[in-house]
Amino acid sequence: MLLNSQKAIISRFGILPLLIEIIHLNRSERDLNSSLESQFVANKFLIFWQSFTQSAIQRGMVRHFPKNMLTIGWLGVLKDKTGLLKTGLVNDEAIRSEQYVEIIREYAQDLMIDDDLMLQQDNAPIHASAYTKYQFDIMGLDVIDWPSKSPDLNPIEHLWANIKRKLKGMKFSNRASFEQEIINQWNSVSQDDLRKLVESMPGRVQKCIKAKGWYFQ
């Protein structure tokens, strides 16, 4: 029986269910790799998107952080573009679909030089709402179907984890200094590193299939 993560991969990339059972065969692996590369490596306008909050970092990541401080922001990477970063958006956790759509619209207008722009996002309520889906349809933005609870499939999760490790133990007296340090860390990531992250996706998806949707290194 296929897990939801496997079904989502099959649905998104047009991989036959039978391929899951015969993945060890060389021809099947070549077919799978070709399908994945056409989606990830050849498509240079695929955006991987990750939201972050101060509260997420505060839990053991940054010491002596004032409890009343809150930052919400988004990180994004493209294979052949510099990193995308938006910070200091709202002062509470109740970010709405309307706000999220405007953030994406801001970047989409700059990046949509042809019809190849695709967006990867998780299944947060503001991402999956009817309003968000409707607005993305109007923008002509193709959103990848994404398995729930699959952070190890998203390359930006590994990049963000590395930034959080660098932030661990730092002290900030105000939100502005915290945001600036995130910007500094983010800007220090080279475009070559971002390209390698995106190009690692075919291998990540293959490992997920071989692991039958479970955890993999």
Image (cartoon, grey):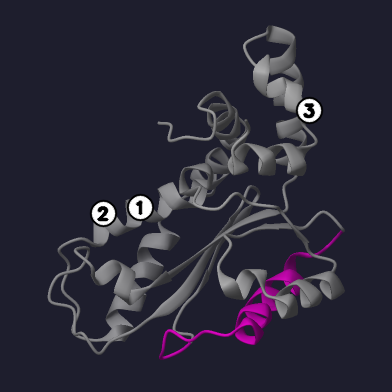
State how far apart marks 2 and 1 are (Cα). 6 Å
State how far apart marks 2 and 3 are (Cα). 39 Å
State how far apart marks 3 and 1 are (Cα). 33 Å
Is residue 42 visible in this depiction of the protein?
Answer: no
Q: Earlier in the sequence, mark 3 or mark 1?
A: 3
Q: Secondary structure at mark 2?
A: helix
Q: Residue at x 86, y 59 (%)?
A: 114
Residue 184 drawn above or below residue 92: above
Which residue is denoted by mark 2 in the rendering?
165
Residue 187: image quadrant is bottom left
Which residue is denoted by mark 3 in the rendering?
16
Residue type, numbered disc 2: Arg
Q: Quadrant of the N terminus?
A: top right
Residue numbers of the magenta segment? 90-114
Residue type, numbered disc 3: Leu
Residue 174 drawn above or below residue 59: below
Residue 213 drawn above or below residue 150: above
Q: Residue at x 32, y 75 (%)?
A: 54
Residue 26: image quadrant is top right
Q: Quadrant of the C terminus?
A: top left
Q: Residue at x 41, y 89 (%)?
A: 92
Front-most of residues 144 and 113? 144
Which residue is denoted by mark 1 in the rendering?
161
Percent x, y of residue 47: 65, 56
Horizontal side of residue 217 vs 204, given as left or right: left
